[in-house]
Image: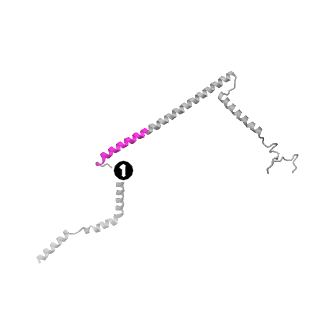
Amino acid sequence: METDETLTNIRTETTLENQDLSFLLPAVGAFLAEYGWYLLFICVGVFLLIQEFRKRRPNQSPSRSSPENVKDATSVVRRQEALEASRQKMQDELDAKAEQYKERKQKAEEDKRKQKIEMWDSMKEGRSYKSSAEAADNNEGTSSSMEVKSKRNLKPLRSGYNPMTGDGGGSCSWRSGRRGPTSGG
């Protein structure tokens, strides 16, 4: 019988050594049942934080830092030089326009000053205040008005037409009111 007892002891010892982790299943199940939603929310929050930190942190890996950074540096320098050149070109154009505007304004002021001097001289001599340029404009205007008047003389409008009398046809005519006192009330 001793052999049977030793045999059972050996069998029990072997079963204890080969036992799986099924004894943790009830404990883990109870933990998940109690705190499962909290655990899920914490995992999702940690995942989102990791993603956010990856976006904010610049990607710097030692294997690709030197060749691409050199390319990026040269392209950045080229881009900045092109930007500076275009800004300088626009500034030069603006300066040229400002200079032209200043010249035009100075010329207009000079013309105005000359016109005032001419007007003062003509006033001293007793002539009219009009300058020669204004006089030339007025002469042209009178000649064109003379041509218009001569055309009217050649082709008269309706003879004897007076819109106040009602003559001349049409459905509308104006008639003067009665003369004399009004009768009423």
Q: Name, please, the residue furthest toward the left.
A: 2
Residue 69 shown left or right of residue 157 in the figure: left
- Count of marks placed on residues: 1
Q: Name, please, the residue furthest toward the bottom.
A: 1
Quick one: SS at disc 1? helix
Question: Residue 177 in magenta?
Answer: no
Residue 71 shown left or right of residue 177 in the figure: left
Span highlighted in magenta in the image: 62-85
Q: Name, please, the residue furthest toward the front.
A: 154
Give the main secondary structure, helix, strand or loop, of the magenta stretch.
helix
Residue 157 shown left or right of residue 32 in the figure: right
Task: Residue 13 in the image: state x and y as whole percent.
Answer: 17, 70
**Is residue 72 placed above or below 24 in the rendered structure?**
above
Badge 1: few (under 14), some or many (20 or more) residues near its Cα, within 10 Å? Answer: few
Coloration mode: one colour
The residue at 33%/65% (across/down) is 32
Question: Residue 65 in magenta?
Answer: yes
Task: Residue 168 in the image: state x and y as whole percent.
Answer: 81, 47
Residue at which label 1 appears:
56
Q: Name, please, the residue furthest toward the top.
A: 125
The residue at 70%/35% (across/down) is 144
Task: Residue 160 in the image: state x and y as whole percent.
Answer: 82, 42
Asked which quadrant contains residue 134, the reply is top right
The residue at 14%/74% (across/down) is 7
The residue at 31%/67% (across/down) is 29
149 and 25: which one is in front? 149
Q: State the quadrant of the N terminus.
A: bottom left
58 and 102: which one is in front? 102
Task: Residue 22 in the image: state x and y as whole percent.
Answer: 26, 69
87 and 144: which one is in front? 144
160 and 34: which one is in front? 160
Q: Amino acid at mark 1?
A: Arg
